[in-house]
Image (cartoon, coloured by chain):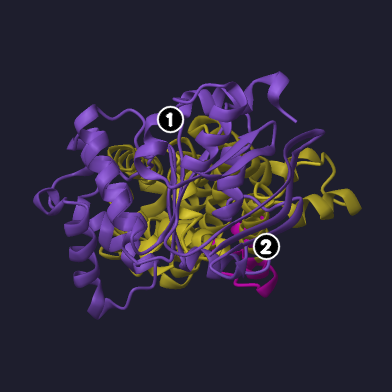
Amino acid sequence: MNTVYRRDLSRMIHSSVVGTIIVLFLMMMGAMFFVDFFDNVQALNLRKFFSQAPLLLSIFCPALTMGTFAEERSHQTLELLETMPVQTWKIVLAKFLCCMTLLAVVFGFTLSYPISLSTLGALDWGPVIGGYIALMLLGGGYLALGILASACTKEQISAFLLAFFMCFALTFIHRLSADSSGMTATMLQNLSANAHFSNIARGVIDIRDILYALTLQFFALTATVLVLEAKKYPAV
Amino acid sequence: MIKVEHFTYDYGSHRAVDDISFELKSGEIVALIGPNGAGKSTTMKVLTTLLRPCGGKVCVAGYDVTENPMRVRENMGYLPETNPLYGDMLVYDALASVAAQRHIPAKNRAEAIETAARQCSILNVMHRPIETLSRGYRQRVGIAQAIIHKPAVLILDEATTGLDPNQICEIRDLILEIGREKTVLISTHILQEVTAIAKRIILLNHGKIACDGPVSELLGTVGKKTGNSSAGIEDLFAFYTHEQHFE
């Protein structure tokens, strides 16, 4: 598993496509921060910055993961990987951790925003730390969905579109309900990544929100393993 | 080393492999041949654990491919038809990565890499990116990856396809050398390869075994049946794959 992780991380770091995606994402994050710069300075928090992150993540995470399995399948290196004595779940987990590492590095670059704000006044670091935890949890869920989409197809663009659709739907599903009360609305709120994310981003760490993100990651990664394993069995 | 009993494989309603059985002993080099769609690739994929059989029992190195695929993979080296390699990696790094995935202990990896590289004559390109290598060298890298962990069974799918005559001779010699110690199953469309490398043929047609035996013995049988005492491998192939001769 460690070998797959290190090889994938090295290949992603040296990939011009991944580099371009990361630069574009950082530029968009930067634009988001500076568009609301004066509001951020006035309020001395990053709430507006964090509130727009789910939409950006629903584009960035599928772009980062689209090649994880689709590229291996189109280059037929997946055939080689699947004949190595490594269990499928370890391959999936290695690829997920590789993407999580890149995501953490990318968020590391954005730490300059709260640091610059803290020089202008007494920044409350609690919500900032909560926001970054929320970004990693939500990012992890979206990365897992992206890996699942990539395992379903050998076209990277199809993987991207499928994952984007799933992430976008999860981000905005709560808006399907016009009424904010009632069982449907509650159900959609519980399904919505945005609703869970906004709690943590405000600095309110609720175990249900953390469980939501971890469950999303677990189910998406388990589904990825099942998809890859199912391809080995004869079609009925 | 390889034991296949009543193996069948279906793609939906189409039966690709129909109740075949064969056994390969240690140190044998066997050619698996047949026309397109005969079931060679499916058989190869089941032997390498990429697919699970629909019926029957398939064992490699004493382990069942369905019950113990990890053990099968540990004891088997495989070169797929397309020889997939990570083109952006250096040859050394690619071999080191495979050695680690093959669970070769870190202290023995350098030696394992050097041994495989020397055997495949790629020591002079170890620090070059794979994508810059000629097709012949890439094929050698693929074979080096397949033998790095000293597997008991080596499965080669179309190992010489697309190579020039000199490269074919080099790969052929390499396979013969490897075959002295290991069980080698090679699938090929190039019939000259069969007589040059293998002592035994398994010919598949319509998912069934049309013939299985030593090359010389089968050529003799075909010669007798066709009245052509100088029958070659092409005649054998035509005889067993032609519709009216197939039972």
Q: How crowded is mark 2: few (under 14 residues within 10 Å), some or many (20 or more)?
A: some
Q: Is residue A207 magenta?
A: yes
Q: Name the residue under label 1.
A: B191
Q: Quarter-wise, where is residue B144 in the image?
A: bottom left
Give the colour in which the image draws chain A: yellow
Camera-side residue of B76 and A63: B76
Question: Measured along the vertical axis of the image, is residue B65 above or below residue B224?
Answer: below
Magenta residues, start to end:
A195-214
Using the rendered image of the protein, determine whether residue B7 is visible from the camera's viewpoint: yes
Three-letter amino acid code at disc 1? Leu
Residues at discs 2 and 1 in contact (Cβ within 8 Å)? no
Q: In whole angstroms, how far apart are the C-alphas of marks 2 and 1?
A: 32 Å
SS class, disc 2: loop
Q: In purple, which chain?
A: B
Q: Name the residue under label 2.
A: B66
Q: Is residue B44 left or right of residue B168?
A: right
The answer to whether residue A56 shows anywhere in this view is no
Q: Nearer the viewer, mark 2 or mark 1?
A: 1
Quadrant of the image containing the C terminus of chain B? top right
